[in-house]
Structure formats: structure tokens, C-alpha cells
Amino acid sequence: MKAFRFVASSLLVPFSLTPLSIAVAQESTGATMDPIVVTATLGPKTVGESLASVTVIDEEDIRSKAPADFSDLLRGQPGINVVGNGSFGKSTSVYTRGIENAGTVFLIDGVKLHAATGGGASWQYVPTDLIQRIEVVRGPRSSLYGADAVGGVIQAFTLDPKQGQRGWVEVGAGNFDTQKASAGVSGSAGNTHFSISGLHKESDGTAIVENGDDRGFRNTAGLGRIVHELDSGGEASVMLLQSEGNTEFEGDNTDYLIRTLGFGLMTPVNDNWQTAVQFSESRDETEQNVRGSEFNTRLRQGRWANTFFYNVHELVVGAELQQDDVESTRDFTETSRTNTAVFSQLRLNFGPVDVQASIRSDDNEAYGTNETGGLALGYKFDQSHRIRASYGTAFKAPTFNDLYWPGIPPNFRGNPDLKAEESENYELGISGNYQTWFWDMALYRIDVDNLITYDRSVGQNFNIEEAKIQGAEFSGGYERNGWRASAALTYMDPEDQTNNKQLVRRTKQTARFDLDKTMSNVMFGGSIIAEGDRYNDAKNEELLAGFATLDLRVGWNFAPSWSTRLTVNNVLDKEYSTADGFYGKYISAGRTAMLSVRYDVQ
């Protein structure tokens, strides 16, 4: 949570989607705890300057908490609800400000990853050990990232090869017969920097429904990045991340693979103009071994962005081409669709006043043309305090499953008459950033037309004519003398206005408190995460009770380059459920523990 200096020399324009290289250096500048982020706007800005609600989860957070799943880092963060079908690599959904899983864009080093069939990201397969930093941006970003960025954008940054020569080896074991091993190395040759890392993890798992059998999980992942710095001051980069394995669930098990591949090139044309291109491909593939069903989706993107500078003002203009393809043993009516887009963002600064305006037009062969825009204003009272107000529109396209799933009633089937979701978003926020602590508060309202939801009684998705989501968020943090603390509180009212019912699987209240202390070569800490009640159905008849969990952790650097860490999650062995399915309520694993030993080479 210290102030960071981001050298986004990859593109300097994060909107080109691939920050090809982001060097993160903690800096004691005497300034505020206001880290630079690259996801919220089309250029690197501090959190305050971004005029957005942003949460940064840095490398120290990730390493100290040693999460079992990527979603464990998101749980309880402001505006975030995590819903899972059990523990250890089971299907997971992330709701951002009450918007369903497919309404949050997920990026890995700027490359969009999603399953075109279900629409959302496969969060459960993301290898957290290979992730260095996460930025969570809440609020509409369709005018920057296109369809689906209704609730927000979450971006994960992998290990940076430009941090110099280093390497590590780590092994660990825990209950439920869980083992993991990871290793990595990075180095340089002239202006070329590289990193290679890998992970293997497996577990016998635990029951995911009451009185069920243990359901295991296996994951093998690898990451490779090469960054070459050009004499012109530009940069070229290639990144490949792949995660594959097997996960078991009630009635079947699934072989899975997710892969992201990105190539980017940035170069300055002159002192006032910078251009960048990016080409990427992501895959999400699954094969159910008992049912014999396969669902393989591929997303290809090409993007060109130009940034023009005039003193402190910036203009970004660009274009994008995206194509989704589906290959499946199921007979989808349509298996491909193409989207073309043009976009622009203007960033102005007049002393204490910041202005941002963005506009984008998407033309999709499946659901037509949509225009989205955003306007944000910020005023900085002094070095520490800022107020912001914003308005934005967004839309979410129906997924291939929503439109074309070839089911037979009463099983789920597609609805080709579905309309795209459209939303208007209003937000007012105020923040304070100081040398050792910060706070941020935000009020927001989202009006959604044609919200897509599932009707279990007919086995089909349909559009809710109008939904309204109102909420308030608070976050704060403190870091001094080895203490590191953070807090997040959310109250949200997600309402279906056609019947005044709470939207499915959204909880109204969440809270998270993290506290860690470092003393010489020992670190210890804990987290409390609490969530309120939620309903599993549109009629609000199936109540899922709220819960709170306690996590504890301790680490010890017991010799030069050697460290060990023990994490115990859900210490009080609380059984809870965030979803109910065909086989009954999906339950948590209860108390889990992991002990690891690591050797670092610098």
C-alpha cells in the first residue's frame, strides 16, 4: 500500500490492453499513499487522478495471504461478491457492484480472458502464484473496454521480467492431501528481459455438497514473458500463460485449459504522438469426461491505439477488432461472431481540476451497434483530499449460452430473443491520501434495462425490464512501523424493480479487515471477512445465510534466502454456502491449512 511508481513503458497507454512491461518500484517520495494504476484510464494515473473507485492488491498482499484460489483475494473487497460451487477449483462467479459474472471484464497483462459460452472468466483456474499485482476497477468501463464492462474491470499482472535477475523455488503441503510446487527465474541480455515460471498443485479436495464425496482438483500452469526495449524508447513484448488440469464435481469431472497469448509493440512517433498495436488470443476449453461434452472458446483481438500529448493534456484515439469462436459437442445455432469498435478518450488537467471524457462505438454482427460514453470530473482540494463525480453508460451482450444453448425443457435452453443489457451509472466519491494512511468513500447508482437473469421454473434466461442497484463503499488502509492494515465495507441494494425483489445471489452487506505485522524476520497477521444473507432464486424464497470467517497467517525468514509460511483459513471451521444447485447447497471446505518453504535467489 506504499506509493508506487509505475513505469508503463510497454504502451504508456494501458488502454491498448497490454501493459507489456510494468516495472513496479516502491518509492518513499514523501507523497501520499496513492499508487499509480493503468486499468482505470487509457494512461497511467494515480488512483486519485483516475477519478474511479479502484482497489490495488499488490505483491506483498498476495505473498502474505498465500491464497488457495484467485477469488480469495477478491472476496470482501469493496463492491465485490464472490459465489462458488465449492472449494478447490470449482466454478466461481464474481459479481461487481451487483452486476453478474459476465458483466465484469477480466484481463491478464491486458489480454481479455472469458468463456464465450458462459460469458465470464474462469477465475478458479487462474494460478495465483504467478500473479504479482491486481487492480480492481469498479464502475462502468464499456466506453474503454467494450461490451461486458458493466460492473467493472479486474486486471491481473504477471511476474515482471524487468525487475532484474532473480529466481525462486517453493514447495508446500496442507490438509485434504494438498501439495504444491512452484519455481521461476528471470534475467536480462542487453535490452532483452525474460521470465519463466511454473506451478503444479493438486488436492484430494473435500465434499462440495452435504454428505457428498471428496472432489479433487489438479492444476499445472506456466508463464513466459519476453520484453525488448527499443532504441527509440519503445518496447516490444510477448507473453504466454497457460493453466490446465482437472477438477471434480458432483456427477462428473472436467479437464480444463485456459491460455492467454499477447504480442504488443509501442513506439513514439514524435514528442507529442505515441502509437501502439496489440494482438492477442485467449482460450477457455473444457471437456466433461462422464457426459462427454466439450466447450472450447477462442477470443482473438487486434487493437491499435494512438496517444497525443499537449502539455498535461492527452487524447487517445484507436480501433479494435474482436472475434469469438465456439467449438462444442453441443449443436449451437451460431458458433462465431465478430465485433469492430472505435474509441477515444480525452484527459484534461486544469490545476486542481481533472476532466475525463470517453466515447466508444461497437458494431457486433450478433446484436447490432451500441454506443457508450463516460464523463468524470475531479477536484483536488489540497495535496491529500479530492472529490470526484462521474456518469457512464455500459452494455452487456448476451452470451452464446444465453442465446443459443440447445437445451430441452425443463433443462436450460437459449433464448434467441434476449436483448443486450444497457445501463446508466452515477457515482460520487471523496478520498483522503496521506503519507501512512488513506481512505475512500463512494456512493453509486446503476439503472439497468433488460437485465439478463435465469428463470428456473421455465429453464431459460429472460430480460428484466428494469433493475436498480444502489450502494455505498468505504475503504481505508494504514502502513507504518511494520504494521499493515486495511478495511473495506460495502452496503448495496440490488433490486429487481418489476417485483421489488433482491437480485439473485447478491448480498447486501460485506466487510473485510486485514491486519499484518512484520518484526525483523517474522511476520504474522489475520483477516476477517463477513457477508450478509442472499437469495438463490428470483422469488426470494431460497435464503442462503450470511457468514463470517477468520484467517490467520505467520511467516519466518529463518535463514538467508530461506522462508517458511503457515496459513490457516476459516480458523473457526465455519460451514457456509453462496450458491444452491441441482445437487443441493454448495458448501465451503471448512478449515484449511497450508505450510510452505521457499528459497529465493537474488
Image (cartoon, helix red, strand yellow):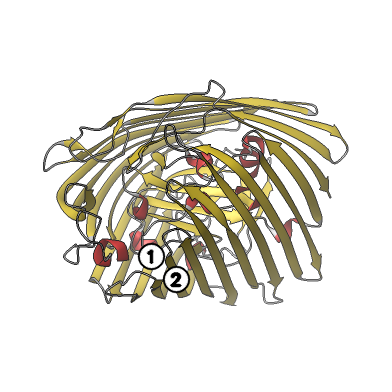
Q: Which quadrant is home to the N terminus?
A: top right
Q: Quadrant of residue 422?
A: bottom left
CB under 8 Å between discs 2 and 1: yes
The kind of residue tagged 2 is Leu
Q: Quadrant of residue 599?
A: top right
The CA span between labels 2 and 1 is 8 Å
* Residue at numbered disc 2: 299
Residue at point 45% right, 34% down? 76
- 295, 320: nearer the viewer: 295
Q: Quadrant of residue 521?
A: top right
The kind of residue tagged 1 is Ala
Q: Position of residue 392 (x, y in %)?
A: 29, 54
Q: Earlier in the sequence, mark 2 or mark 1?
A: 1
Q: Position of residue 92 (x, y in %)?
A: 44, 47
Residue 245 shown left or right of residue 50 in the figure:
right
Residue 275 shown left or right of residue 579 in the figure:
right
* Residue at numbered disc 1: 116
Mark count: 2
Residue at the top extreme of this rendering: 572
Residue at point 62% right, 67% down? 240
428 lies above or below 134: above
Residue 222 shown left or right of residue 74 in the figure:
right
327 lies above or below 75: below
Residue at point 33% right, 63% down? 147
Mark 1 Cα shell of 10 Å, populated few (<14), some (14-19), many (≥20): many
For residue 187, which numbered disc appears in the image? Answer: none
- Residue 517 visible (yes or no): no
Query: Please, what secondary structure does the residue beneath circle 1 have?
Result: loop
Q: Position of residue 185 (x, y in %)?
A: 78, 58
Mark 2 Cα shell of 10 Å, populated few (<14), some (14-19), many (≥20): many
- 554, 147: nearer the viewer: 554
